[in-house]
Image (tube, grey):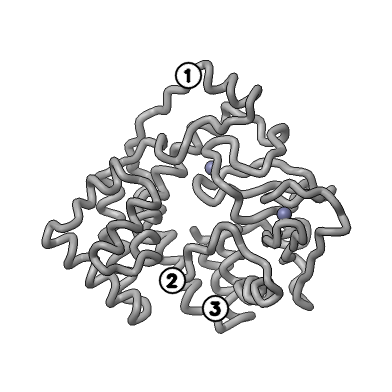
Amino acid sequence: MEKLRERVQQIKKKRPGYGEILGFYQKVREAQNKVKTSLKIKSIKLRKEWKELLTKEGFSLIQKEDFPLDIEASIKLFESLCQIGKDSNPHMAEQVRKIKETIDHKRIDLKKLLKEELKEQRIEQVANEFGLDNKVFSFLIQSSIKPSIEAGMEKLRNELDPETWLKEYCPICGSLPSLSLLKEEVGKRYLLCSFCGYQWRIDRLTCPFCGNKEQESIQYFFAEGEEPYRIELCDKCHQYIKTIDYRTLEESDPVLEDLATLHLDILASQKGYKRPVPNPWIT
Ligand SMILES: [Zn+2]
Ligand SMILES: [Zn+2]
């Protein structure tokens, strides 16, 4: 956490415009971290055939819904996040007020929503039903279960070899990547799972969304003076991924680095490319 705080200060000095969103990120991470130490997560029993399906058919080990959650801890965290949201920007504060009101009047059963209905469509349906901002509502729900998800991923990571999977989706939960990372001197490329945070290896010149390997249809750009951050555009599927080059940047939280370079996402979208997994922090 100390490292994260330092990095936030560093970035704020360089790009003051990001001060508010980075401050918000830091507070949320601190709240999530606090929960992590006392988390009670059931172990995940893997059936033998699951691992066979993984190696033979390329199925992910489990699905998003299979992660065991610590519901009590998630509810507590939800409360803390609502408080943080109230103190951030006016739109968030207003949304939090509405969400709390709906829950307090027992029109939403938060426990049930977290436990049984961990599906994006369900969250969207509930948000629509009660006139809530779907982005804020799902951000709060997803951020509340994040420590449980990360703990589950930690339990499963030893089942896999991150160097040999080489596919475009997460071997643990099947989700799409949110970022690509270059590491070690040779620049090995890894993808970061947008849901569970697992990292796995992939070829340098592959579009992580459609598998395109033709060099002439993959281009990239970066901003001057910001060489460690690169946007890779695929002309086959018209989607892009942001790459963080840790050969020239000290090891740090990739999600924080992603947030601190939102201007690159704006440029990519102006060029007509889409980000398959939208950044959940922009609400
Ligand atoms: Zn995953
Ligand atoms: Zn593509």
- The residue identified by callout 3 is 18
Query: Which amino acid does the dot numbered 1 rest on?
Result: Arg
Question: Dot 3, crowdedness within 10 Å: few (<14), some or many (≥20)?
Answer: some
Q: Is the residue under label 3 in contact with that under label 2 (CB below 8 Å)?
A: no
Between discs 1 and 3, the one toward the N terminus: 3
Relative to 85, residue 116 above or below = above
Task: Indicate which disc residue 47 carries.
Answer: 1
Residue at image coords 67%, 61%: 239
User: Is residue 3 among what the camera can see?
Assistant: no
Residue drawn 49% across the image and 38% down it? 153
Residue named by callout 2: 283
Answer left or right for 252 relative to 76: right
Q: Residue at x 57, y 22 (%)?
A: 51
| Quadrant housing the C terminus | bottom left
Q: Is residue 128 left or right of residue 167?
A: left
- In space, the residues marked 1 and 3 are separated at their CA atoms by 45 Å
Q: Is residue 123 left or right of residue 102?
A: right
Mark 2 or mark 3: whose residue is earlier in sequence: 3
Secondary structure under badge 3?
helix
Q: Which amino acid lies under the numbered mark 2 shown in the image of this protein? A: Thr
The x, y position of residue 2, in whole percent, is 51, 61
Note whether ligand 1 is within 8 Å of mark 1.
no
